[in-house]
Image (tube, rainbow, N blue to C red):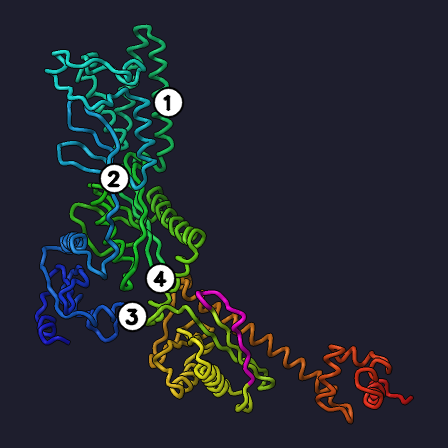
Amino acid sequence: MNPSLELQLKTLPSDPGVYRYYDKSENLLYVGKAKNLKKRVLSYFNKNLPGYRIKIMVGKIHRLETTIVNSEYDALLLENNLIKEHQPFYNVMLKDDKTYPWICIKNEDFPRIFLTRTKIKDGSEYYGPYAKVRPAKILLDTIKHIYKLRTCNLNLAPSKIHDGKYKVCLEYHIKNCEGPCEGLESKEEYDEKIDAIRGIIKGDFQTAKKYLVNQMMKYAENLQFENAQTIKERLDILEDYQVKHTVVNPNIDDVDVFGMTSDETAAYVNYFKIRNGNIIQSFTTEIKKIIEESDEDILEEALIEIRQKFNSDSKEVLIPFHLTVEIPNVKLIVPKMGDKKRIVELSEKNAKEYRIEKLKQVQIVDPERHSNRIMAEMQKLLRMPVEPRHIEGFDNSNIQGTNPVSACVVFKDGKPSKADYRIFHPKTVIGPDDYATMEEVIFRRYKRMLDEGEDLPQLILIDGGKGQLSSAIKSLKLLGLYGKITIVGIAKRLEEIFFPEDPIPLYLDKRSETLKILQRVRDEAHRFGVRHHRTRRTNSTIKSELELIPGIGDRTVEMLLSKLKSVKRVKEANLETLEEILGKSKGRIVYEFFNNNSI
């Protein structure tokens, strides 16, 4: 360890803050937050680090910097900002340069309302962002069906309208605009519509409904029934939109909701912004795991990032599990029952569906990318220097030491390559000795591959625990291949993954694609081995029965089985058939043996 780094570790403060790791080239590796800087940073330099990827990162640390803040929440905000600014290699989770659409109410006389992906600091109001364009367009279309707003970009200053600078355009004549450019609509009337529209965008439909009802009543009182009917239709449109977006009790107001699911390589976080019982925004994102981050750590980071992205100032946040971070003036609630519990479950369901959809899309649309993703995951989880494009799995099969066979199956890019499967019959092992059999077979397999200049696998999978793995390692050492090929063992009972010289096995998530591939290789090796073991045992039984015939040797037995295929057919064959196959002398011997008579 760098002496200056060692000194820094001894003098760390115990305050909340942010720490930054740098390598020898002064590249920023990682930014983290802590409630207690001393405890958190020292945990990285513990010998029993939880993950392989963390060990890699720690091995690169040459220098660290710390910044003390007042609270853990302040540390979380500072960490978020530093990650956005510097984008360190081991902090990919918060990188997001996507430009999402906003609904803009322009800062001008008679404001226009439109979609934009660019925010300009000119006093305009921006609502969003929207994770998808379609919901924003539906909302805008609903608003335009209800209210007649101007779409031109004229400067409608009162002086210019008063001077008669403009004339109404086609939009006025087709009844899409009330003609404010000629003073046909007052600023007070127009601003009343804008206030109602603000409410709709925020999920408050009461102001808009009140405005429309008042309009409808005025027309009705003046016997303008066609206009009243038009307003009634607009009110129906608004109520229909509201019904489709009300998902919980309307009394649940101004709440943020987060749901989450995760696997070995990524987490998927869903966010709902709820106002007056309406989901006015929904957003789901995939967050790649880099150094085995926990779900709690990821959700803390995502919660701050997403609330900033969507400009949320909600004082209540519903989450699926408890977090240690405290946000000033905000309640983090894990609901146990009722409507709030159901909305969290709905958010989690959205996160799960998003994950399934993503994986299916990759597998169907881009199978190569799907394969690459699995290979990259296996490389990380199995601590490999390269991706396991070529995997070989071994399994021994015998019953009480009889007719032993060892199977070798080959997988390329995660798929079986059956033309490369091999069966080995042990030559030096006597009796049921799995360890010695594995040692012999591994030596024979890779000695031949080396002699013939064949491409070696990147991963060898041994069906068994530490004993079988140790035996295979002996052979790799004799061949000079130990350390050049990754080798692991997989035990059936708990699906433990054993590594050489590591007493602690790895337990993979049951949903992990890596575990599924390893299980498939193991099961295929077992199936292939058992099939050939049964065939050999059956052939051995048949052969021993025919060898009981006096005067009949191995070559004669093989000739009979080659022609007649089974002992049953040999027994049922007539004399002429047997003499045709073996000749008169041996044919008569076989016939008399099974028919127990003489001719």
Q: Which residue is mark 4?
A: 264
Q: Which residue is mark 1?
A: 236
Q: Which residue is mark 3?
A: 52
**What amino acid type is highlighted by mark number 2?**
Pro
Vertical placement of 340 versus 550: above or below? above
Q: CA distance from mark 4 to mark 1?
A: 48 Å
Kindly check if marks 4 and 1 are in contact, taking CB atoms under 8 A apart as contact.
no
Vertical placement of 217 versus 296: above or below? above
Q: Is residue 578 visible?
A: yes
Q: Quadrant of the N terminus?
A: bottom left
- Circle nearer the N terminus (2, 1): 2
Which residue is found at the position 38% from the left and 27% from the top?
Answer: 240
In depth, the one of 230 and 316 nearer the eye is 230
In depth, the one of 375 and 37 nearer the eye is 375
Kindly check if marks 4 and 2 are in contact, taking CB atoms under 8 A apart as contact.
no
Determine whether the residue tagged by mark 2 lies in a helix, strand or loop.
loop
- Circle nearer the N terminus (3, 2): 3
**What amino acid type is highlighted by mark number 3?**
Tyr
Q: Splitting the image into 4 quarters, where does residue 208 fall?
A: top left
Determine whether the residue tagged by mark 4 lies in a helix, strand or loop.
loop
- Circle nearer the N terminus (3, 4): 3
State which region is magenta. Answer: 412-425
Q: Nearest to the eye among marks 2 and 1: give it.
A: 2
**What amino acid type is highlighted by mark number 4?**
Glu
Q: Which residue is mark 2?
A: 129
